């Protein structure tokens, strides 16, 4: 921090998250302003750490870009804003647009596009020699026909800018595919088509400082997120073995992806699929912390809280130093619960690190220095979750990460 005036950080959150980020900014001496949706007026915001909260009218939590630009520019007549930090995936473009408009440093619109648009990230990764599932933009019908004659089914049709597996559809034949494409009408060009790669899905969560990945950790989802979202299942993920071939490959690929997309400073949650051919394919990246309580998973294993470290990095810049990183193992389980207040007191092993507190949800993080112990607990707890709590429901209208 330079000079004596505290930095003013404007946080954008169209979803209820990032409380730990805002609290850490305040601890670091910043003046923290939150811009959120009118519909989130009564959410659990860390009001004691916030200088002010501004509400933007929203339709299904989505903001009108022009409203936000007018609103923030009006606010800026009286308040000098030093930093703009989008806390949710959907806020990344808005944050970039505001930075461009107010001429504030940080990720601009060109780079933000690589972290939000799945077509943009596919094209860029491929240009830079990173393996991706064969894909085509749903634009030119001749090219789509050429693609389906070359790339064997099944395929997935995917919105370019969504999250939480929303709107992803699997097609097993050209007829089924054209049915899906035709039904999209004018929204076709906002989608891409790609080969369905059967296999395990992995995520790498990292911190980037001055274009270098200074922290990264690789984890493997239990069932692929799409199966969890579409079929209903207990969501699980766990840290993979430190030093294993898969870990080394994932961490190296993650570095290549973040370099390729041009990440300069901040955090990222990046995903890969391991195909039947043993090859890792780049799935998607983002400039935000992972959703679905991955922050608690990473904290359990390493002692690093990604929200807090991100806040310190934003504020301290080049002077930021990563704290000591522990190398324990951890696993996360989350499920919808049929009970309003599910009781997890019977899950009382000493390895339980964190318990979710959310109506109709149940979630736990376990941690241990031993990977085998995490495997054992995850298997046992997953079975018990199905028995004790599990409730299935159709995919949500709005994403929850
Ligand atoms: N090409 C693919 N092959 C197999 N599964 C896929 C493919 N693309 C997406 N999926 C499945 O859909 C999920 C969501 O896709 P992803 O691209 O990560 O979008 P988002 O998480 O933003 O909704 C993945 O975790 C995976 O389970
Ligand atoms: Mg994903």
Image (cartoon, helix red, strand yellow):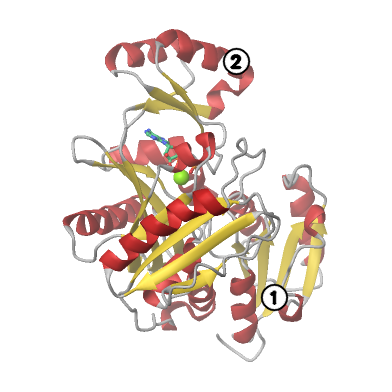
Q: In this rendering, is residue 329 above or below 92?
A: below
- Disc 1 marks which residue? 32
Whether residue 101 sits left or right of residue 323 in the image: it is right
Ligand 1 contact, mark 2 (Cβ < 8 Å): no
Residue 311 point in image, percent of width and height: 54, 74
Question: Image quadrant of residue 120?
Answer: top left
Q: In this rendering, is residue 351 above or below 11?
A: below
Which secondary structure, mark 2?
helix
Give the camera-side residue of 265 and 82. 265
Residue 160 point in image, percent of width and height: 51, 35
Tag shown at residue 183: 2
Ligand 1, by image quadrant, is top left
Q: Nearer the viewer, mark 1 or mark 2?
A: 2
Residue 294 point in image, percent of width and height: 47, 61
Residue 206 point in image, percent of width and height: 39, 64
Which secondary structure, mark 1?
strand
Cα distance, mark 1 to mark 2?
44 Å
Look at 75% across and 53% down and name the residue there: 68
Q: In this rendering, is residue 15 above or below 304?
A: above
Look at 47% across and 12% down and name the residue there: 176
């Amino acid at each position: 921090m330079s000079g004596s005036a505290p930095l003013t950080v404007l946080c954008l959150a169209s979803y209820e998250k990032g409380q730990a980020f805002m609290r850490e900014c305040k601890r670091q001496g910043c003046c923290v302003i939150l811009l959120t949706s009118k519909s989130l007026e009564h959410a659990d915001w860390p009001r004691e750490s916030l200088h002010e909260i501004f509400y933007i009218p929203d339709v299904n939590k989505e903001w009108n870009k022009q409203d936000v630009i007018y609103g923030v520019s009006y606010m800026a007549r009286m308040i000098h804003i030093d930093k703009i930090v989008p806390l949710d995936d959907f806020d990344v473009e808005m944050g970039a647009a505001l930075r461009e408009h107010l001429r504030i440093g940080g990720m601009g619109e060109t780079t933000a596009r690589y972290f939000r648009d799945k077509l943009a990230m596919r094209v860029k990764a491929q240009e830079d020699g990173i393996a991706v599932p064969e894909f085509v933009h749903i634009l030119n019908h001749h090219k789509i026909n050429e693609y389906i004659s070359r790339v064997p089914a099944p395929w997935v049709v995917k919105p370019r800018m969504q999250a939480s597996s929303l709107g992803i559809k699997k097609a097993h034949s050209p007829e089924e595919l054209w049915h899906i494409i035709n039904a999209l009408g004018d929204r076709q060009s906002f989608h891409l088509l790609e080969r369905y790669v059967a296999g395990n899905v992995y995520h790498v969560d990292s911190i980037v400082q001055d274009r270098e990945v200074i922290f990264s950790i690789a984890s493997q989802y239990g069932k692929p997120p799409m199966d969890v979202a579409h079929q209903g299942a207990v969501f699980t993920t766990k840290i993979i073995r430190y030093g294993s071939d898969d870990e080394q490959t994932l961490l190296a690929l993650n570095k290549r992806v973040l370099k390729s997309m041009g990440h300069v400073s901040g955090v990222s949650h990046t995903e890969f699929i391991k195909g039947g051919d043993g090859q890792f394919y780049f799935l998607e990246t983002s400039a935000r912390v992972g959703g679905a309580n991955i922050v608690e998973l990473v904290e359990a294993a390493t002692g690093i809280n990604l929200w807090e470290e991100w806040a310190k990095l934003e504020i301290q810049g080049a002077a930021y130093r990563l704290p000591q990183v522990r190398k324990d193992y951890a696993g996360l389980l989350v499920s919808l619960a049929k009970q309003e207040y599910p009781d997890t007191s019977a899950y009382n092993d000493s390895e339980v690190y964190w318990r979710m507190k959310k109506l109709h949800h149940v979630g736990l993080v376990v941690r241990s220095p031993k990977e085998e112990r995490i495997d054992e607990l995850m298997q046992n707890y997953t079975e018990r979750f199905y028995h004790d709590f599990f409730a299935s429901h159709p995919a949500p209208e709005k994403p929850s990460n």
